[in-house]
Image: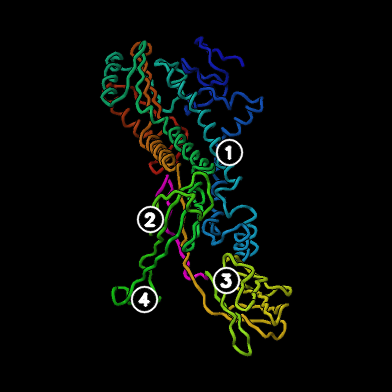
């Protein structure tokens, strides 16, 4: 697109509102307006210049402040919806089917819809990640669209400006003084005293301070972009791990999110307060029964770079033994394993014996491992007990068939086939806790003898490589907030006219009261013309609209 040539001879990029050299308005709107818009120094912005190609349209879309605000609202609304029900991390389930069943059981149709729309794991959902990406794109494009033209304009700004530029400033004055040279010199002296950077060129003075505050919003945006980038990094493998693992006593399992590492639960210990030792807890103990003093997991950490099977210790290298307690995690290779929860007295195995009902004769005992049960158990005198079906968490009968609601042995039930020399075809029996059912009247029975229990520890595995990046983004964000909030960019132009005439103009990006206060000091000291605030709408100290001037 062709450049715009100003009357002063300077060629400006297409879309420029104010001449980069003299400040003359270059558009009809700028010429007709009482005050000129100084937000971007009248520079040409890409989003307002190029509108033809698909790249231009995408750029213009994301450079819009309205679009950015709408994306922020969408992120806030979806984040709020994600707090209605617990997130996946806080659901006591091990598989996706269990998670879905949890939401359906506890929250009905709303819970089902919540799960299917992905709100149960919202911060890892593809649509939330896209929203964050769109927000970051909007911030980057909107910032680049504004900060580069602004930087170029402020860097190139001339000391001497055309009178049409000065007359369209909010603070303006012109008049004849007793001695323009003396007033000019005194104004320079006073402005330097007020810590302005003063430049003089051909009878024109530009006093400026606080320019760095103009970059506050962009520093702010830079911090926010770094923060959002760290959030997106969390979705990539290896940058962020937050997993839950339940480990039974004596069990060795691979640590989720930490390839090559295994953890063995040697023992789980729980300590409670007693009324005799801790009198201060006496009333609380009477009210609630028990109060936990400490719970910890004594574990062994193994490493196998070649990826051996869990439990095969000869293939794994011993790393260390450790006692994990609350606020005292196991640390290794950037990972932290925290003690978060526990379950007591889970059934580990059950021991039975095969009996002849009429004589109470025992054919021996057998033990069923509830996590890995065997199919056949050989007893004395050629007797065999065959485990036909196993229901770890028996939940009644549906459509004539027993059902289990989970793989955890909370309420185990069995269907046994009892084979003896007298009954070579066997007799079937359904055995559950406090319940035995027979299809016919059997001569033999499986009788419960004892049960072995063990505790389960609930551990959380965490690793966060993005933490320092998040912290850096937050620090930069706050620096930008302070930079743009507590300082402001102030400029004062003073130019000599014919004879003893002086022209005065002033501009600031905010806090006009402070600018006028400093101008009053300069005016009084240098005997400058009386200025006027020509803003169409006046504001009082409370920021409320007042009478129009």
C-alpha separation, residue under disc 3 versus residue under disc 1: 64 Å
Answer with mark 2 or mark 3, whichever residue precedes in sequence.
2
Give the residue at x 55% y 54%: 82
Residue 335 in the magenta stretch? The answer is: yes
Q: Residues within 10 Å of mark 3 (few under 14, many from 20)?
A: some
C-alpha separation, residue under disc 2 versus residue under disc 3: 31 Å
Mark 3 = which residue? 368
Mark 1 = which residue? 67
C-alpha separation, residue under disc 2 versus residue under disc 1: 52 Å
Task: State the quadrant of the C terminus.
Answer: top left
Residue 166 shown left or right of residue 75 in the figure: left
Which mark lies nearer to you, 2 or 3? Answer: 3
Which mark lies nearer to you, 4 or 1? Answer: 4
Badge 2 element? strand
* Total numbered badges shown on the rendered structure: 4
C-alpha separation, residue under disc 4 versus residue under disc 1: 58 Å
Q: Position of residue 452 (x, y in %)?
A: 50, 72
Q: How is the image coloured?
A: rainbow
Highlighted range, magenta:
331-347
Answer with mark 4 or mark 3, whichever residue precedes in sequence.
4
């Amino acid at each position: 697109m062709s450049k715009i040539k100003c009357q002063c001879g300077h060629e400006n990029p297409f879309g420029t509102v104010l001449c980069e050299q003299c400040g003359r308005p270059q558009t009809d709107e700028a010429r007709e307006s009482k005050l000129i818009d100084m937000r971007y120094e009248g520079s040409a912005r890409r989003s307002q210049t190029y509108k033809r190609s698909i790249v231009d349209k995408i750029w213009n879309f994301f450079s819009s402040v309205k679009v950015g605000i709408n994306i922020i609202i969408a992120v806030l609304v979806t984040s709020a919806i994600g707090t209605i029900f617990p997130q996946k991390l806080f659901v006591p389930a091990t598989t996706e089917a269990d998670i879905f069943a949890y939401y359906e059981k506890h929250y009905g149709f709303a819970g089902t819809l919540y799960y299917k729309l992905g709100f149960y794991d919202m911060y890892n959902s593809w649509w939330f990640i896209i929203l964050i990406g769109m927000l970051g794109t909007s911030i980057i494009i909107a910032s680049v669209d504004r900060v580069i033209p602004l930087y170029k304009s402020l860097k190139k700004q001339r000391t001497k400006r055309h009178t049409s530029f000065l007359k369209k400033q909010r603070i303006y004055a012109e008049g004849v003084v007793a001695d323009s040279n003396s007033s000019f010199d005194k104004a320079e002296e006073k402005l330097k005293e007020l810590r302005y950077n003063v430049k003089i060129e051909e009878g024109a003075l530009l006093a400026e301070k606080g320019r760095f505050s103009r970059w506050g919003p962009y520093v702010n945006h830079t911090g926010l972009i770094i923060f959002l980038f760290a959030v997106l990094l969390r979705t990539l493998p290896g940058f962020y791990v937050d997993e839950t693992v339940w480990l039974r006593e004596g069990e060795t399992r691979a640590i989720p999110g930490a390839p090559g590492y295994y953890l063995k639960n040697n023992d789980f210990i729980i300590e409670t307060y007693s009324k005799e030792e801790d009198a201060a807890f006496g009333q609380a103990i009477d009210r609630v029964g028990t109060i936990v003093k400490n719970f910890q997991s004594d574990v062994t950490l193994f490493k196998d770079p070649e990826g051996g099977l869990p439990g095969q210790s000869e293939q794994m290298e011993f790393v260390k033994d450790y006692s994990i307690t609350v606020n005292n995690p196991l640390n290794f290779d950037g990972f932290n394993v925290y003690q978060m929860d526990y379950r007591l007295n889970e059934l580990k195995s059950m021991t039975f014996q095969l009996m002849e009902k009429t004589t109470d004769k025992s054919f021996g005992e057998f033990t069923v491992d509830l996590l890995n049960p065997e199919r056949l158990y050989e007893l004395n005198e050629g007797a065999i007990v065959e485990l036909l079906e196993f229901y770890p968490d028996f939940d009644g009968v549906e459509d004539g068939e027993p059902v289990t609601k989970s793989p955890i042995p909370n309420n185990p039930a069995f269907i046994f086939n009892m084979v003896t020399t007298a009954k070579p075809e066997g007799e079937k029996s359904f055995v559950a806790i406090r319940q035995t059912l027979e299809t016919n009247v059997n001569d033999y029975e499986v009788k419960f003898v004892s049960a072995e229990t063990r505790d389960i520890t609930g551990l959380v595995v965490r690793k966060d490589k993005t933490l320092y990046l998040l912290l850096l983004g937050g620090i930069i964000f706050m620096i930008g907030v302070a930079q743009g909030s507590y300082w402001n960019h102030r400029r004062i132009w003073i130019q000599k006219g014919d004879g003893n005439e002086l022209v005065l103009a002033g501009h600031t990006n905010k806090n006009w009261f402070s600018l006028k206060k400093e101008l009053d000091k300069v005016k009084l000291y240098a005997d400058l013309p009386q200025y006027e605030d020509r803003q169409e709408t006046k504001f009082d100290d409370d920021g409320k609209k007042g009478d129009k001037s």
